[in-house]
Amino acid sequence: MTETSPDAQRRGRRQLLALAAIFFVPLAIAFWLYYGPGAWRPSGGANKGDLIDPARPLPEVALPTADGAATAPGFLRGKWTMLYVGDGACDARCREALYLMRQSHIALNKDMDRVQRVFLVTGNCCDRDFLDREHPDLELVRVDDPVAAALLAQFPSYGGVPVGAAGRIYLVDPLGNLLMSYSAEAPAKSLLTDTRKLLRLSHIG
């Protein structure tokens, strides 16, 4: 006979609450750490990127990849993302940004798997010989499709320059929030420093 006493019901509720805590408490702590009052939030300055405040949620949208497939709608979720937006021809500034992303990613060592690198490609796509040779793990996603408009609209404008021409690197959290931006003139270690701090403080992604 199935046990249905009040004590058994209470034990069952406690077990459910414990399971919920395992999944949701780390998420709540992560939110509090970098969104709550007094939380650690990287600020602009000589050694950091530019804080996007408030953080901007990026919409879930399926976009074409450079090889003709399509991303999952939530391709910017589940991991931290180092992201660059620019023309697929990839000029010198673009190549420097992708190099910085790659080297910062490598320097994360054991935390590499928590971070992905994405190139949102505007205009013509792509210099595949260069990208396949130098950045084989870089995800190439085309944003010249009209469905990408809602995604690009969430990126801040700096000096009135369109996001595709700004030459900036962005940091996105595993919930799809746009958190940080780095100019081409930012110190080389800024991206790595901020990413390490966020990974250390967060248990999501």
Image: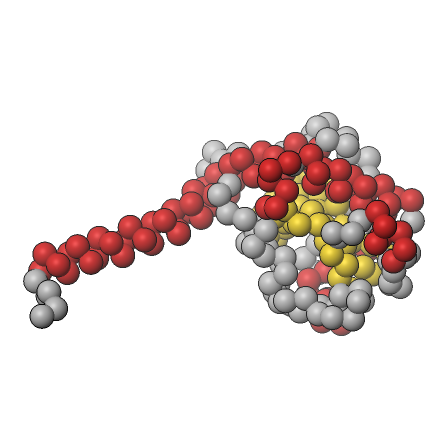
Residue 13 visible to an observer of this rendering: yes
Question: In this orientation, which residue lies closer to the viewer: 162 or 104?
Answer: 104
From the viewer's perspective, is residue 22 above or below residue 190? below
Q: Residue at x 10, y 56 (%)?
A: 7
Q: What colouring method underlies this structural image?
A: secondary structure
Q: In this view, does 51 lie to the left or right of 4?
A: right
| Extreme residue toward the front, this view | 1
Give the x, y percent position of residue 58. Answer: 62, 58
From the viewer's perspective, is residue 45 above or below residue 117? above
From the viewer's perspective, is residue 154 above or below residue 40? below
Give the x, y percent position of residue 26. Answer: 42, 45
Give the x, y percent position of residue 92. Answer: 91, 44
Question: In this orientation, which residue lies closer to the viewer: 114 or 161?
Answer: 114
State the count of labels.
0
Q: In this view, does 75 lie to the left or right of 96?
A: left
Q: Which residue is drawn at 33% across and 54% down?
A: 20
Residue 159 visible to an observer of this rendering: no
Q: In this view, does 29 lie to the left or right of 49?
A: left
| Extreme residue toward the top, this view | 46
Q: Which residue is drawn at 80% across and 64% down?
A: 66
Give the x, y percent position of residue 22. Answer: 36, 49
Quarter of image, res 106: top right
Question: In this orientation, which residue lies closer to the viewer: 176 or 104?
Answer: 104
Q: In this view, does 119 lie to the left or right of 205?
A: right
| Image quarter in which the N terminus is found | bottom left
Question: In this orientation, which residue lies closer to the viewer: 154 or 101?
Answer: 101
